[in-house]
Amino acid sequence: MRSPFPISIRPCTCCRTKVPRNANMEKLRNGYLFPEISRLELEHIEKYPNAKLISLGIGDTTEPVPQIITSTMANYANALSTADGYTGYGPEQGHKALRKAIVKAFYKDLQIKDTEVFVSDGAQCDITRLQLLLGSKVTIAVQDPSFPAYIDSSVIIGQAGDLKGDGERYGSIEYMNCGPENNFFPDLATTPRADVIFFCSPNNPTGHAATRKQLELLVKFARDNGSIIIFDSAYSSYVQDDHCPRSIFEIPGSRQVAIEISSFSKFAGFTGVRLGWTVVPDELLYSNGFPVIHDFNRIVCTCFNGASNVAQAGGLACLSSQGFKAVNSLVDYYMENANILGEALASVGLQVYGGANAPYIWVHFPGSISWDVCKDILEETHIITVPGSGFGPSGEGFLRLSAFGHRECILEAAARLKTLFL
């Protein structure tokens, strides 16, 4: 019988505990997507040590955090060495000043209260906290393709069921196809009810930003079915189109059916600093009438000691008038990168989506296996991309390219790709 472990992690069988492995962990498919991409990159570097590798893969920011923000964090950190400047634990929900600043910057005139904002160490961590809140008995629906953490956290918590025969889908998850044929928005008329709907806009990986009309349909669907939308707005700062809301709470009626998660990572370059937030409205109630916000507060207080005080000082600086202007210049920089990549790929006849309201380019290679295309491009051009199938079954035949990169690398990548496909 073949061992279930890769050779590198096969355990010693001479000494074991009597604790069984979590059965849900055994249901996970392979490794998490982005470490797999990192492994592919390391293997390529070993094979071609002198090649100039360019990564358009993992969506990690590359440009320096503006000095007005880093100097604020440095001053806060230095003050910790003084009696007057030292701080210990803060409120688990986040510093009051930052919660108020988040409301002012992102939810002005949307009736969001600072007490409904929970500051965290990032949106991905909050996805898991929300899964812990919701438990294993709820049913879920996800966009297909979508960010892998929605699926993997559902598997770990016990919501997903078993893999179907095709090995691509879990039996208890509703996959809502979102592709070019339906303008990247699910056909809600044929979508079965689910307790929880994960929805990301602008979408990672497709780069599509849902229109106001589309989100109105989503909110109506949730209200009609008594569902909760978990709306991931981590890329909302990249929205350029006024017809595309930056928050689900721009839609009337959403306060009764939606939670929003967001992040400083992609608009402020805080991927390493770690800072985000979740909004849970007072009006959101369980079927028994109990407010969801009370349970989420308990989850946060039980599982989390609050975001770093230094990170929160940086977040507050981001939302100052000067800081906000500085981070928006980073957004403009990455959007220009997206434009460069999109134009280059379109110029050689490829079908390109995204890039207009998000820092991701979604490229179609009809009839192809996305992992094969990813590996072929890496071999021929020394460029890392991400295969679309890693984001779900409907991502097969696509590649995701990230616009996070230094300008010279983006220009070089565009030139190499044009040469490859001409």
Image (cartoon, grey):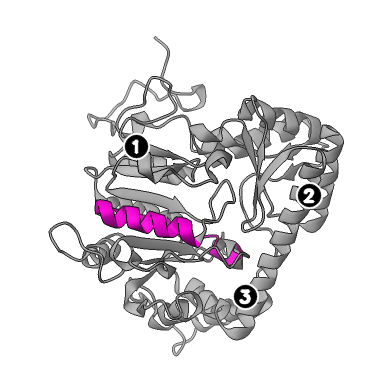
Q: Residue at x 46, y 55 (%)?
A: 214
- Whether 268 is drawn above or below 381: the answer is below
Q: Nearer the viewer, residue 279 or 75?
A: 279
**Within 10 angstroms of label 1, few (less than 14), some, or many (20 or more) residues?**
many
Foreground residue, 407 or 45? 407
Dot placed on the residue nearer the N-terminal end, 2 or 1: 1
Q: Which residue is mark 2?
A: 343
The three-letter code of the residue at mark 1 reads Ile
The reply to whether the C-beta atoms of the residues labelled 3 and 1 are less than 8 Å apart is no
SS label for mark 2? helix
Residue 360 vs residue 264, the one in the foreground: 360
- Name the residue carrying label 3: 70
**291 to the left or right of 166:** left
Q: Marks 3 and 2, how far apart in space?
A: 34 Å
- Amino acid identity at mark 3: Thr
Kind of residue at badge 2: Glu
Picture quadrant where residue 141 is located: top left
Residue ID for mark 1: 173
Q: Earlier in the sequence, mark 3 or mark 2?
A: 3
Answer few, some or many: residues within 10 Å of disc 2's Cα (few below 14, many 20 plus, some between 14 and 19).
some
User: Which label sits in the foreground, 2 or 1?
Assistant: 2
Query: In the drawing, does residue 406 fall left or right of residue 374?
Result: right
Q: Main secondary structure of the magenta part?
A: helix
Residue 119 sits above or below residue 160 on the image: below
First to last magenta residue range: 212-238
Left or right placement of residue 12 versus residue 408 in this view = left
